[in-house]
């Protein structure tokens, strides 16, 4: 396991909300991260339909983006969200996990730029897509 992969894994395990939501890194590469969030009835935003709350979806997207930044070859340690714009495309399918995928496509001296999508676990039709900027800092 590379040092960056190890740092990203430690990052996820250190976040209480990530543990509580059951976030798991499923793929990690140079500037790329994929993670899942299992369906949990405690995260439902509409009890009549069983659809997950948008805040839960935004959390997995944001966390995945930060992980992608940390895994980028030019990253220098920890990161924090500066700005994250999320476009919700459709409701998540009740009962299904959310899969977030993020790519850090550019890093300057102080800022990383990331794009991400979130899908249900059985389709590639986006639930949401996002773009954002993140700090690039020392560990």
Image: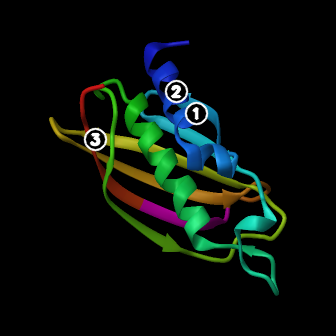
> Which type of secondary structure does the marked residue at label 2 adopt?
helix
- Whether label 1 touches label 2, CB < 8 Å: yes
Residue 123 shown in magenta = no
Sort mark 1 into few (<14), some (14-19) or many (20+) by Cα contacts within 10 Å: some
Image location of residue 87, percent across then percent down: 47, 73
Q: Quadrant of residue 96?
A: bottom right
Query: CA gap, disc 3 to disc 2?
Result: 23 Å
The tag on residue 10 is: 2
State the image coordinates of residue 28 (x, y, percent, origin top left). 55, 30
Contact between marks 3 and 2 (CB within 8 A): the answer is: no
Task: Give the number of the disc on residue 106.
Answer: 3
Residue 13, numbered circle: 1
Q: Is residue 66 left or right of residue 108?
A: right
Colouring style: rainbow
- The rendered magenta stretch, by its main secondary structure, is classed as strand
> Label 3 neighbourhood size at 10 Å, few (<14), some (14-19), many (20+)?
some
Crowd class of label 2 (few under 14; some 14 to 19; many from 20; radius 10 Å): few
Segment colored magenta? 125-130
Q: Residue at x 79, y 82 (%)?
A: 47
Give the residue at x 59% y 72%: 54
Label 3 residue SS: strand
Q: Nearer the viewer, residue 25 or 11?
A: 11
Circle 3 or circle 1, nearest the eye:
1
Q: Residue at x 34, y 57 (%)?
A: 132
Local secondary structure at mark 1? helix
- In the displayed structure, 77 sits above or below 25; it is above
Give the answer, above or below, for where 107 lies relative to 86.
above
Say which quadrant the C terminus sits in. top left
Q: CA distance from mark 1 to mark 2?
A: 5 Å
């Amino acid at each position: 396991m590379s040092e960056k992969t190890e740092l990203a894994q430690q990052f996820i395990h250190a976040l209480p909300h990530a543990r509580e939501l059951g976030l798991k890194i499923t793929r990690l590469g140079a500037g790329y991260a994929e993670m899942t969030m299992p369906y949990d009835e405690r995260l439902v935003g509409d009890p009549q339909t069983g659809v997950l709350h948008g805040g839960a979806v935004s959390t997995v997207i944001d966390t995945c983006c930060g992980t992608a930044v940390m895994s980028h070859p030019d990253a220098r340690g920890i990161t924090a969200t500066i700005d994250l714009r999320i476009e919700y495309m459709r409701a998540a399918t009740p009962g299904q996990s959310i899969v977030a995928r993020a790519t850090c496509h550019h890093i300057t001296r102080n800022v990383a730029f990331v794009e991400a999508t979130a899908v249900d676990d059985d389709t590639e039709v986006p639930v949401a897509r996002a773009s954002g900027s993140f700090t690039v800092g020392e560990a």
